Image (cartoon, helix red, strand yellow):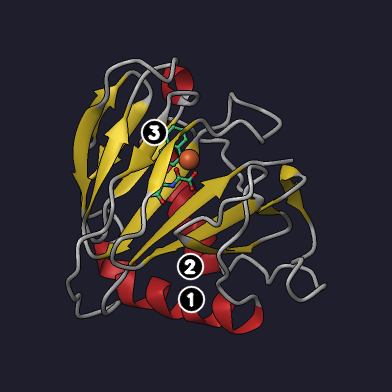
Amino acid sequence: QPLTLQSGALVLPRFAESRSAALVQAIAAVAAVAPFRRMETPGGFTMSAAMTNCGPLGWVSDRTGYRYQTDDPTTGKPWPAMLSIMRNLAMEAAVEAGFPGFEPDACLVNRYQPGARMSLHQDRNEQDFSQPIVSVSLGLSMVFLFGGLRRQDKTQKITLSHGDVVVWGGPSRLRYHGVLALKPGSHPQTGACRYNLTFRRAG
Ligand code: MD3
Ligand code: FE
């Protein structure tokens, strides 16, 4: 039963819960090939969330900017393949939310440990903003901030919990968003962290 946050932004509560153990395993398999790392921003800061990617394209940040690329800068090798358990979940969620043609070519995996956060930003490095982004939260809950089309617009706080899936499309695709610092805790499947998968059509 999808809940509409804003036009185009639909929450599918616990949509991924029955597959969560397999998804956490899939993340471990990805990280065994493309390790989690904290990337540098063009401004010279180090992001507090650690990241990796799977699929044909992966999102990277360094002193020169943000972009998608086929190779992992840490290993010099292509990103590992997007496992079908991940891809299928993203496509099924997109169908539920009214985006039947969604074929992700990038999955960015974020890992938050206590204190890690993500400040308000827009996702604009993808080619086609008519394609949604599908996000999957695993492990500890976190407070998500959902704003408007301008950075200064007022934000709505939403708690995202283990297994929740959100599809961000249509007029919500370019809204500012971020997450507050993760509070310490422990989750049976992920331990002291939260993972977030974001599936994108990047190229
Ligand atoms: C709304 N990640 O990776 S997921 C990101 O929890 C990112 O790790 C956050 O923002 C996280 O870029 C938020 C929810 C999310 C993802 C992408 C969006 C919300 C979005 C793109 C447009 C609008
Ligand atoms: Fe984002």
Q: Which of 168 and 144 is in front in this view?
A: 144
Q: Earlier in the sequence, mark 1 or mark 3?
A: 1
Q: Distance between the residues labelled 1 and 3?
A: 26 Å
Provide the residue designation for mark 1.
Answer: 26
Q: Which amino acid type is marked by label 3?
A: His
Provide the residue designation for mark 3.
Answer: 177
Provide the residue designation for mark 2.
Answer: 85
Name which quarter of the figure residue 57 lies in.
bottom right
Mark 3 CB near ligand 1 (8 Å cut): yes
> Which of the two discs, 1 and 2, sits closer to the camera?
1
Q: Do the residues labelled 1 and 2 touch (CB within 8 Å)?
A: yes
Q: Do the residues labelled 3 and 2 touch (CB within 8 Å)?
A: no
Q: Do the residues labelled 1 and 3 touch (CB within 8 Å)?
A: no
Q: Earlier in the sequence, mark 3 or mark 2?
A: 2
120 to the left or right of 190: right
- Say what secondary structure mark 1 lies in: helix
Q: In which quarter of the image is the C terminus?
A: top right
Check disc 3: other Cα within 10 Å, few if <14, some if 14-19, many if 20+.
Answer: many
Q: Distance between the residues labelled 3 and 2?
A: 26 Å
